[in-house]
């Protein structure tokens, strides 16, 4: 499975070059993220289900010690408003895309909370005062 996610051999034969993003067209986004987190990033065990990954996301967002960030996501033509949630106790980060009204991804950034601090116009929300 890991080879399929990183560089499927059949894809190179069909196109003459490797282009793993083409595979994403055929796999639902949530399932793709689950497979990536398990087999590429190796941040979750191989027996993790999509329900478990979603439960980790909910627990991260709802935890009292989770940091909340508001920022512009700069990898789109126009920056998109996103909310980031990071739990230092679990290392889990959740990205909520406000414009799409969905959780964009759940992952464990190596750089921890600095991942959010490095985004476009990033502001950390003070959970006690609910201010930036």
Image (cartoon, helix red, strand yellow):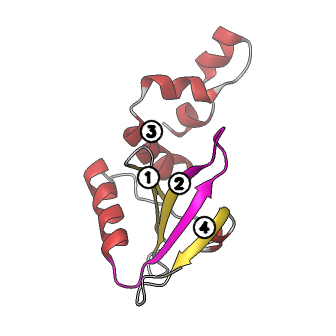
Q: Which dot, 2 or 4, sits closer to the camera?
A: 2
Distance between the Cα atoms at labels 3 and 4? Answer: 22 Å
* Tag shown at residue 23: none
2 and 1 marks in contact (CB < 8 Å): yes
Residue at 31% from the left image edge and 70% from the top image edge: 59
The residue labelled by disc 2 is: 81
Where 101 sits versus 44, above or below?
A: above
The residue labelled by disc 4 is: 116
Q: Which dot, 1 or 3, sits closer to the camera?
A: 1
Distance between the Cα atoms at labels 3 and 2? Answer: 23 Å
Q: Residue furthest bottom?
A: 128
**Residue 118 in picture, x, y percent from top left:** 69, 66
Which is more toward the observer, 26 or 65? 65
**Residue 32 in picture, x, y percent from top left:** 44, 39
**Residue 119 in picture, x, y percent from top left:** 66, 62
Q: Earlier in the sequence, mark 1 or mark 4?
A: 1
Element class at badge 4: helix
Q: Which residues are magenta?
A: 63-80
The residue labelled by disc 1 is: 98
The residue labelled by disc 3 is: 32
């Amino acid at each position: 499975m890991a080879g399929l996610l990183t560089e499927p051999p059949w894809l190179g034969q069909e196109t003459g070059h490797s282009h793993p993003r083409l595979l994403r067209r055929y796999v639902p986004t949530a399932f793709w993220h689950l497979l990536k987190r398990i087999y590429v990033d190796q941040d979750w065990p191989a027996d993790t289900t999509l329900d478990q990954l979603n439960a980790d996301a909910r627990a991260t967002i709802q935890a009292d010690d989770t940091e909340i960030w508001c920022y512009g996501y700069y990898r789109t033509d126009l920056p998109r408003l996103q909310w980031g949630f990071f739990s230092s106790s679990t290392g889990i980060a959740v990205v909520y895309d406000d414009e799409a009204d969905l959780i964009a991804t759940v992952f464990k950034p190596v750089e921890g909370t600095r991942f959010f601090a490095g985004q476009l116009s990033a502001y950390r929300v003070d959970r006690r005062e609910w201010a930036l």
